[in-house]
Amino acid sequence: MNSHTTCPYCGVGCGVEVIRDSGQISGVKGDKKHPANFGRLCVKGSSLHETLDTRGRLLKPQVDGLPAHWDDALNEVAARFQRTVEEHGPDSVAMYLSGQLLTEDYYVANKLMKGFIGTANIDTNSRLCMASTVVGYKRAFGSDTVPCSYDDIELANLIVLVGSNTAWNHPILFQRMVLAKKNNPNLKVVVIDPRETATCKLADIHLALKPGSDTRLFNGLLSWLAANGHLDQDYIDRFTDGFEYALAAAVNSSADPRQLAEDCDLPVESLHSFFNWFGATENVLTFFSQGTNQSASGVDNVNAITNCHLATGRVGQPGQGPFSLTGQPNAMGGREVGGLANQLAAHMDFDAESIDRVERFWDAPNMATKPGYKAVDLFQAIERGEVKAVWIMATNPVVSLPDADQIKRALEKCETVVVSECVADSDTAKFADILLPATGWSEKDGTVTNSERRISRQRGLIPMSGEARHDWWIMCEVAKRMGYDTEFSYRHPSEIFAEHAALSGFENEGQRDFDISYFSNIDRFTYDNLKPIQWPVTAECPDGTERMFADGKFFTPTGRARFVEIIPRAPVQQPTDRAPLVMNTGRIRDQWHTMTRTGTAPRLFNHREEPFVEVHPRDAAIRNISDGMLVKVSNPRADYYARTRIEEGQRKGEIFVPMHWNEAFASQGRMGALVAPVTDPLSGQPELKHAAVQMEPL
Ligand code: SF4
């Protein structure tokens, strides 16, 4: 039996080989043949077998707090959703999903909601992760397409890392960068991040810019490239539109280098070096991640970067391109099946032609015709009583969403809360009327897509724990009880994958980027043995596609890429006299999300054992705070208690807190409660990196 699977943590998507002993998993090692990691695993990945204990697992369905048989629990979910739809219409129900789900789970959820129940109120925690990139790529390329491959790392001569602590959050890619720099003395690395993170150890230049000044910086770069003869005018003329408007906006906001340095709070010499390197180096790879996306200007941040790559013709060529690093293992797969409230399946939008196409493909009786609520708006609609039934799968919004106490209020008020989970007592599960035990990593069977568009198999290698069931199966059983029998009669995830593949190729003569129609008739054996492969995968490119847009053809109506005019805007949550500090949030090296899985492996606490607040020595001194002291971080929304870590690498006036701790581990450690529900107006992605707070010793 195939023992190869994929790590369920980050968007690097490393291949894992499982070691089994008497039917149990006794160890893991990196899959030497997987092109994402070639045998390497980080500390989280190499601890996977230590997180498989069934203690703390949800092993039996519950209805209204009492154990229930599956049949009764499924009947209850179907009846409550059906009744709510009949009484209040399809938009009175919702789903909130997760980048932890497999593509097949995601596909069934979207088909049920958007095609059969008739609402697009189905969003996902990928909204917190990559939604700004989706819109940014679509504005520039006409499609949500990552143009690059991991192999570009070894071909680049300049790697720019923007808002990305790659060393901790995408460790195996970072190791590739370390090795690439060792083997290529010409490779330079620039890190653009307000904090001096572990990633900066690899940097030739660290630009510790003022938070929220990213668009100004990249507008400045575009102006400088134009003023210093570094444009690829032939590429601009042949393959793009809108350059003159983007350049005019860039010159207007950021042309004077001294003013730009002041606006971004950067040394002018470092700025010059970065600009000179970017201008003079052909093979430039710009990675960006949550620091870019989690902003009220997240989409503009992405396009400001993309503008610079288009202006130099550096998109889709070996070693070149704007490269989004996804946080979650399957944020990409979710996007592919339309896992955001404003998307349809197979990267289609809510335009009349696509609605009609998907409706015909599914033979859908109740096709949704407009976008639904995005994550933050969805939970506000629940609190208003507009959405009366919600089904949450594999995610913990009570910890992770901004204004996290509002999520509690919303769930308390919601008439029906269904939670599908692996763990018994997550912060969100406490609000469930119906709890459904879901299978976890190494039990689940399906596919995921990593940051370089590579589809890999996550394989079911051990029996399901207790009465846990696969998410796709649970949803199909509910769908059948709602009267949609034949349309949800899948017997195996390979059948779902084949249908998803067929939809990607349906009436798609090269107009849409996401196309895996080669797999439309995939059989179970081939699916079980599927090798990691980058989409598109079609009859013309059966071995997948390493890079996109090398030919200068894009998915816009004109076939040309688009520059976007960027007018810099300041972050919305600004410091005040009573909340004078800017709070940045993010991940730490050894934990994942809200710790429901990594929190069960003791050795993953060796790195950081409790929540903390990183603070600059000056900010500590003026508050009489010493290293390791217990402090209260607060604003009118909430309080957060933790010990300090005094760090020179923290900017003055700014603090950093980790995103992970849930109430089971730290009763006052949910950082989300301090963040206002401010979002990017185009992507709906929350501004999680710029909250206003105060801090005082206890
Ligand atoms: Fe898993 Fe990411 Fe670590 Fe790879 S880098 S082993 S995918 S957590």
Image: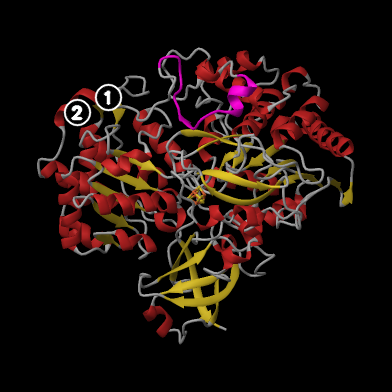
Q: In this image, 237 relative to 519: left or right? A: left
Q: What residue type is labelled 2?
A: Tyr
Verify whether residue 503 appears in magenta. no
Work out which quarter of the rendered image holds the N terminus and state it.
top right
Q: Position of residue 273 (x, y in %)?
A: 16, 56
Residue 312 is at least partly visible in this image = yes
Q: Where is residue 696 in the image (x, y as percent from the top left)?
A: 52, 80
Q: In this image, 669 relative to 221: left or right? A: right
Residue sitting at x 32%, y 54%:
178
Residue sitting at x 62%, y 23%:
525
Q: Where is residue 459 in the image (x, y as percent from the top left)?
A: 63, 37
Q: In this image, 630 relative to 150: left or right? A: right
Look at mark 2 in the image and give the residue it sits on: 235
Q: Main SS of the magenta segment?
A: loop
Bounds of the magenta segment: 523-540
SS under mark 1: loop
Residue sitting at x 32%, y 20%:
559
